[in-house]
Amino acid sequence: MRRLHSLAFLTILVTSLPFSSTADAESTRTDGSLNLAQGERMAADLKQGMSRDEVQKLLGKPSQTALKSDANATNVPSKGTLQWIYAFGGASTRRSLRVEFAAKSLEDWYVNSWEWTTY
């Protein structure tokens, strides 16, 4: 009976491991719990021209987004700029990374620039 309990426990443990590690990795990137040093190390791999998917793979989901349209008086659809904002650090060292995307077409966004700000 004891062997059966051990076998059942090991089976549950082994089958749940892939789910727990995936959830932990995802939550650390999206909940703003990364410290500033971790954020700076990840941001060092940003490159001009990266796609939205590449940035999301590197930094995770942004904590804020903004879309700014070009001031365009014509009826031509404006591409504008897309901004993703990531927050890093604790209460005393809170900084944000703003990644700005430009568009080759209406759905083809690429990294144009990024900057760190303190708030």
Image (spheres, grey):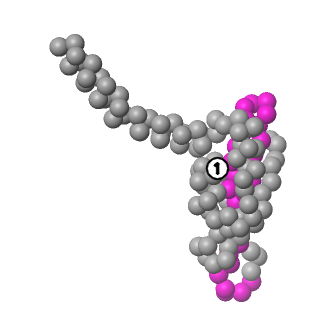
Residue at 53% x, 43% y is: 26
Q: Which span of residues is magenta-colored?
A: 73-100
Query: Which residue is situated farthest in the top direction here?
Result: 2
The residue identified by callout 1 is 59
Query: Which residue is situated farthest in the front direction here?
Result: 3
Q: Nearer the viewer, residue 119 or 34?
A: 34
Question: Percent x, y for residue 7?
Answer: 25, 23
Residue 79 shown in magenta: yes
In the image, 65: left or right of 92? left
Q: Quadrant of the N terminus?
A: top left
Which quarter of the figure has residue 98?
bottom right
In the image, 14: left or right of 73? left
In the image, 37: left or right of 54? right
Residue at 40% x, 34% y is: 17
Q: Secondary structure at mark 1?
A: helix
Whether residue 79 is visible, yes or no, is: yes
* Amino acid type of the residue tagged 1 in the rendering: Leu
Which quarter of the figure has residue 107?
bottom right
Q: Nearer the viewer, residue 37 or 78?
A: 37
Question: Percent x, y for residue 18?
Answer: 41, 39
Residue at 29% x, 23% y is: 9
Q: Quadrant of the C terminus?
A: top right
Residue at 35% x, 32% y is: 14
Q: Nearer the viewer, residue 83 or 13?
A: 13
Q: From this view, report whether residue 44 is shown above or below residue 100.
A: above
Whether residue 82 is visible, yes or no, is: no
